[in-house]
Image (tube, rainbow, N blue to C red):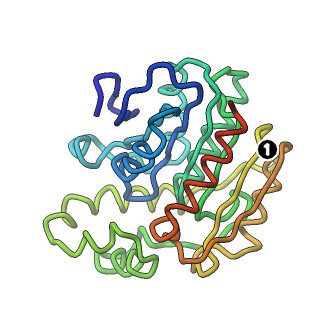
Amino acid sequence: MTSSSTRWLRRFHPADGRAVRLVCFPHAGGSASYYHPVSAALAADTEVIALQYPGRQDRRTEPCVDSIAVLADRITDELLTLDDRPTLYFGHSMGAVLAFETAWRLEHKGSGQAPRGIVASGRRAPSTSRAETVHQRDDEGVLAELRLLDGSDARALADEEILRMAMPAIRADYRAVERYTCEPGRVLRCPITALTGDADPRTTLAEAEAWQDHTTGGFRLEVLPGGHFFLAEQQAAVLREITTELAGLR
């Protein structure tokens, strides 16, 4: 973490003089460090910022936030402190929802810090809905969901001590995203690229395609091999998608 990082915004590599910015929004239970490899890969010409939500890692003593709206409000306030260099958002799963809601707030404010594009990964469109109650399960039930999704974090949670530390944040994140509803007609001006795994048990192709209803800019859908955490297995492909979108901002 560099000296220019804050509680919310983490920079793992120097950012001075970079022409464009990438802001990364972690998944439920995830942390900023998940995006360290992305920062390392792009550090030569991109300022990479990864968000650190409360209640995890070095913020584990802070109260978790179990509302997408509140999280998006606080993230918006943090991003308003940045300069207005061209910016792309990348969000996976819950992070895609937060990227969308944060972008809408910044566009609504007419802010120069609003993103020029969003890559929404591993998440159904905000206008789609499902009855989901993972946050109401006991700890073993939450773990069963994580194993179904096959995230790398799920394997780490086999350690009882890590589980004990991480479970409050995981449960709060699930509570936030499962209770989230998108206001009708909420549409962005910036383009959206949706990435989805062809075997994701929590996002159908139709639900991923529905992201196109949330932008008046361009829309592109890319289907990659894998389940919900396809980005762990398809790192090179996901990085190419991000690089392609960043190239359009330069």
Residue found farthest to the left: 161
Q: Which residue is mark 1?
A: 187
Q: Residue at x 83, y 47 (%)?
A: 218
Quadrant in which the N terminus appears: top left
Q: Residue at x 79, y 44 (%)?
A: 187
Q: Please tell me which residue lies in front, 99 or 219.
A: 219
Q: Please tell me which residue lies in front, 116 or 28.
A: 116
Q: Residue at x 36, y 50 (%)?
A: 31
- In the picture, measured across the screen, residue 58 lies left or right of residue 210, that is left
Q: Residue at x 66, y 29 (%)?
A: 114
Q: Report helix, strand or loop for mark 1.
A: loop
Relative vertical location of residue 141 with respect to residue 57 in this rendering, above or below: below
- Label 1: few (<14), some (14–19) or many (≥20) C-alpha neighbours in 10 Å: some
Quadrant in which the C terminus appears: top right
How many numbered discs, if any? 1
Q: Please tell me which residue lies in front, 201 or 132.
A: 201
Q: Residue 81 in the image: state x and y as whole percent.
A: 50, 19
Residue found farthest to the right: 216
User: Which quarter of the picture shows residue 142?
Assistant: bottom left
- In the picture, measured across the screen, residue 204 lies left or right of residue 170, that is right
Q: Please tell me which residue lies in front, 227 or 159.
A: 227
* Residue type, mark 1 in image: Val
Q: Residue 41 in the image: state x and y as whole percent.
A: 45, 46
Q: Residue 69 in the image: state x and y as whole percent.
A: 55, 43
User: Which quarter of the picture shows residue 127?
Assistant: bottom right
